[in-house]
Image: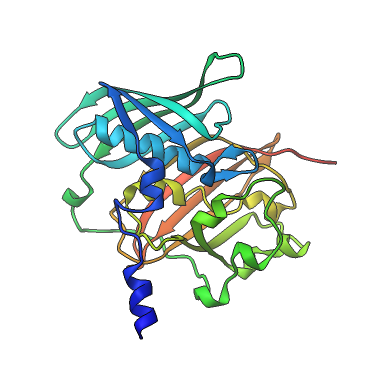
Amino acid sequence: MAEAATAQAARATIGDSEFDRDTAVTLREPGVYGIDLSAGWTIINAVNGGYLLAVLGRALGDALPHRDPFTVSAHYLTASQPGPAVIRTDVVRTGRTLSTGQASLFQYDDEGREVERIRVLASYGDLDSLPDDVRTSAKPPAIPPPDRCFGPEDGPALVSGSSAITDRLKLRLDPATLGWALGSPSGKGEMRGWFGLADGRDADPLSLLLAVDALPPTAFELGISGWVPTVELTVHVRCRPAPGPLRVSITTRNLAGGFLEEDAEVWDSADRLVAQSRQLARVRLTS
């Protein structure tokens, strides 16, 4: 009983967690923010795209009069590396319901030249002001309970190189989407699982930007291994998530010309669809 109480007390809270510290930005001058991108959110040798989206999302939430991301579209121009970065924001339009802004993240290359890594256009609003009525045909994904799913510690490394991000997350993957880990990918292009942050912090709108890009790529179940870099990612945040673990379902229907799409849905503990996304990703096909 005492151990359970201690574990509960040790849970990180929104605003006081590793995720919050590692996405915190420092205002240098109006519209310009600094950050030291953490190596804790890397996969192979690059910083995870969902983490980057949350970083820029935090800067835009500070720059705009509205705090909650409604729709965020990002183009990933070059791979980001751990270390110093600068974010420049621009307020495009402000309204009563929505505010729109854009942001770009820059780093310096080995020759000292400034390189743009990612560019974002986003609209922000107030999720708590939305009406309660829901008319939907969407249903939560059927995923076994977490104790019947598997985490990264139960199988081989996802990719060769850094997988530091898996230590920051609490992932439990649906066994039906883990054929690739056993050398028998299903060919269905599906990935499903439970998602949470390792320190127990509950989800909020900002962390949903990470959740849509945190599971292994669907390309693994198509029999493709290795890095699957994101080219473009659009996220729609539909409502503020309830406390508790999230369920994430990702599907790919079409791989052509070395590119595939991934459609993601994120559901909260109250069976509400809290976020959706689509991304275009590049894959390296081998003969």
Please identify the residue farthest to the right as the structure is shown. 287
Q: Quadrant of residue 78?
A: top right
Q: Which of the image's four quarters has the N terminus?
A: bottom left
Please identify the residue farthest to the left as the structure is shown. 96
Residue 16 on image: x %, y %: 31, 53
Which of these two is toward me, 34 or 148?
34
Which of these two is toward me, 116 or 134?
116
Q: Quadrant of residue 240?
A: bottom left
Residue at the (85%, 41%) spot, across then down: 287
Which of these two is toward me, 225 or 29?
29
Residue 138 on image: x %, y %: 41, 60
Residue 43 on image: x %, y %: 60, 45
Residue 107 on image: x %, y %: 50, 23
Q: Is residue 37 left or right of residue 14?
A: right
Residue at the (67%, 54%) spot, across then down: 158
Residue 255 drawn above or below residue 128:
above
Which of these two is toward me, 128 or 79?
79
Number of numbered callouts drawn: 0
Residue at the (53%, 62%) spot, across then down: 171
Q: Is residue 110 left or right of residue 68?
A: right
Q: Is residue 209 left or right of residue 193?
A: left
Residue at the (45%, 27%) spot, across then down: 85
Question: Which coloring applies here?
Answer: rainbow
Q: Is residue 67 left or right of residue 22?
A: left
